Amino acid sequence: MAVQLLKPGGVLVYSTCTITLAENEEQVAWALRTFPCLQLQHQEPHVGGEGMMGAGLSLEQLKQLQRFDPSVVRSQNTDMDSLRDARIEDMVWLANKDCIGFFIAKFIKCKSTQEKDP
């Protein structure tokens, strides 16, 4: 398991290209229970929304996750000439408009502890 290979202070990023609770927030909750040495970290830039409830994560933990579901993006007509003066938020929207969903969780290993058996 990757957690066991990390030194204290090491960073582990868990990312998927799906929007399911089972493959995203439930995996984060499992990792936090199984490896008490892991802590969620805020991510920059923060492009996606916060995590989805239902896996037992706190509201603060959900805010540290990134989740992007392209089905919730509003429809917008953008021509190429308008991109010259576009805001960064509009550029991010345009870049993500036709993509699949994604999920990102960033962990840091705080100290060396004995992990529970998975």
Image (cartoon, helix red, strand yellow):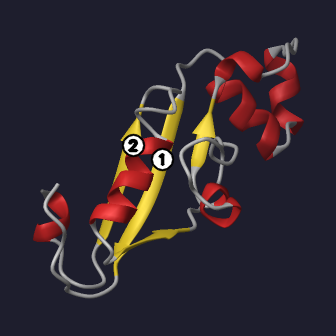
Whether label 2 touches label 1, CB < 8 Å: yes
Q: Is residue 45 visible?
A: no
Residue positioned 85% across, 19% down in the render: 74
As measured in the structure, the alpha-carbon distance from the residue carrying label 2 to the one carrying label 1 is: 4 Å
Residue picked out by circle 2:
15
Tell me the kind of residue under disc 2. Ser
Decide which of tag 2 and tag 1 comes sooner along the chain: 2
Residue positioned 80% across, 42% down in the render: 89
- Seen from the viewer's position, the closer of residues 74 and 92 is 74
Q: Is residue 17 visible?
A: yes
Tell me the kind of residue under disc 1. Ile
Residue positioned 52% across, 19% down in the render: 100
Q: Which mark is residue 76?
A: none
Is 14 located above or below residue 101 in the figure?
Answer: below
Image quarter of residue 48: top right
What is the x, y in percent for residue 23? 40, 33
What is the x, y in percent for residue 77? 88, 11
Say how many tags the image has.
2
Residue picked out by circle 1:
104
